[in-house]
Amino acid sequence: MTGHDGWEPEAPELVRSYVITKGRGLPDEEHLSLITLVTASAEDTRRPARLSPEEQSLLDLCSAGYLSVAEIAGHTHFPLGVVRILLASLKEGGHIMTRPPVARARPADKEILEEVLNGLRAKFG
């Protein structure tokens, strides 16, 4: 279908997900959840040449510091499942390190906070 000026929109190149992931399945949710933090391994100073371009781009992104799996998927515009599979492959190869997200802090005791506030008011007015 052409537009008014005879311009035909160019279709983006489509690569199927199973081609990118080489047919591998999804890793366990407990190992690579949406909030798992990922960074490049410190020992991985030389990048192996046999990584796919997609794995290489994930590794480049992870070398900047810790990012969550969801953030990586957002930056790369890859589907989340594809990102999880590629990260699992990079982890198996020792190229990245993962750690669970920081645990939530437990809520502060309201009575203690009120005592601190009253003490500050008494001291400083």
Image: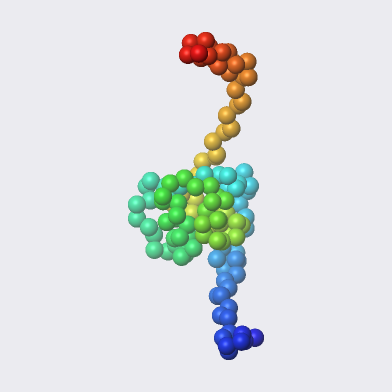
Residue at (38% x, 51% y) in the render:
44
Furthest toward the left, the residue is 45
- Residue 10, relative to residue 30: is it above or below? below
Q: Residue 18, image x and y in percent?
A: 60, 66
State the count of labels.
0
- Residue 89, relative to residue 30: is it above or below? below
- Is any atom of residue 96 visible in this view? yes
Q: Residue 27, image x and y in percent?
A: 61, 52
Q: Residue 114, image x and y in percent?
A: 60, 16
Which quadrant of the figure has residue 79? Answer: bottom right
Residue at (34% x, 52% y) in the render:
45
- Is any atom of residue 31 visible in this view? no
Residue at (57% x, 71% y) in the render:
15
Colour scheme of the picture: rainbow
Q: Residue 54, image x and y in percent?
A: 49, 63
Residue at (45% x, 54% y) in the render:
61
Question: Quick one: 8 or 117, which is closer to the camera?
Answer: 117
Question: Quick one: 119 or 59, which is closer to the camera?
Answer: 119
Furthest toward the front, the residue is 125
Question: Quick one: 66 or 114, which is closer to the camera?
Answer: 114
- For the N terminus, the image quarter is bottom right
